[in-house]
Amino acid sequence: MLRMTLTVVLASVLVVLMGCRASNTGRGQIVPSSSSAVSSPIGAVNLTSASEADLIEQVVINRQAYRHGLELLVSYYTRMGNNMKLTWAQKELSALIAMPKYKYIIDAQPAGPDLKATTLIPEADVLYQEGRQLEKDAGILPFAKSEELLRLALEKYNQLISRHPSSDKIDDAAFHAGGIYEYFKDYNIALLYYQRAYQWDKETPHPTRFKAAYILDRHMHRRAEALDLYREAVREDSEFEEWTIFARKRIKELTGEEQSTQ
């Protein structure tokens, strides 16, 4: 009986081992998460004195080096005909490319509220039109938009604002950038863009005050600020009929909330 049991166990082990060998998943070659070995990053900076910009630059350099190293491995294993390791390298490279990579520096922050949208600048108009076209190409349906194209549109709008701060299109660029950030649920940044749009052009042809008030109200729950801005929007931007109707309704609801808590 004991002999039969041992035979069954050994047979089971062999089946498992042969199955692993046949599948070539590479799971045994994954670096353990608890490993104590730490590689020094390329061109390491002094963490005690490094600025935010230094650290972000370091991340970018190391990302590029990591990707380049994987691409070299893919090329090498392709030449060598090592399909097992080629698969590993391709899978890791694909995961690296798909992984979110943040810029960390918010492009819109350096632009203060004192810019004025006054001057017709052809180069700025070109950037604006390129941004609008990229937005359109990204698609209409919220669940099927190309986020890559939306980010490219953001780059165009930010370039316009930074390169041509007196352009009469900076408020338009800020409004559409705010919409993209709102789509990405980056509400703090979206709010800043919407505010800049009406600060840079008090007669901007976009419902920027309403949009800013809505974010303060619905997403940031800063209801007192939202109430003031809803009132300002109704007073200054009443040509946006649907938004005006909504704002009046919210003003009644919010003032009712205020009275009920007193």
Image (cartoon, rainbow, N blue to C red):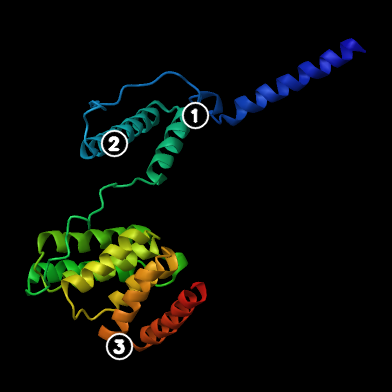
Q: Is residue 16 above or below residue 57?
A: above
- Tell me the residue at 30%/58% (across/down): 151
| Closer to us: 193 or 85 | 193
Write down the residue under mark 1: 84
| Closer to us: 14 or 107 | 107
Coordinates of residue 173 in the picture (x, y in percent): 22, 69
Write down the residue under mark 3: 238
Give the mark, 2 or 3, whose residue is nearer the N terminus.
2
Give the mark, 1 or 3, whose residue is nearer the N terminus.
1
Residue mark closest to the camera, 2 vs 3:
3
**In this picture, residue 140 sits left or right of residue 9:** left
Coordinates of residue 237 in the picture (x, y in percent): 27, 84
Give the class, few, some or many, for how many residues have Cα within 10 Å of label 1's Cα (few <14, many ≥20): few
| Closer to us: 227 or 141 | 227
Give the mark, 1 or 2, whose residue is nearer the N terminus.
2
**In this picture, residue 228 sits left or right of residue 22:** left
Q: Is residue 146 above or below residue 30?
A: below
Residue mark closest to the camera, 1 vs 2:
2
Write down the residue under mark 2: 59
| Closer to us: 172 or 252 | 252
Give the class, few, some or many, for how many residues have Cα within 10 Å of label 3's Cα (few <14, many ≥20): some
Q: State the SS at label 2.
A: helix
Q: Residue furthest front?
A: 262
Regarding residue 134, the answer to whether it shows in the image is no
- Tell me the residue at 16%/61% (across/down): 112
**In this picture, residue 159 sits left or right of residue 258:** left
Spatial CA distance of label 2 from label 3 is: 47 Å
Q: Is residue 78 above or below residue 251?
A: above
- Tell me the residue at 42%/32% (across/down): 89
The kind of residue on which mark 1 rests is Met
Coordinates of residue 206 in the picture (x, y in percent): 26, 79
Q: Are marks 2 and 3 in contact (CB under 8 Å)?
A: no
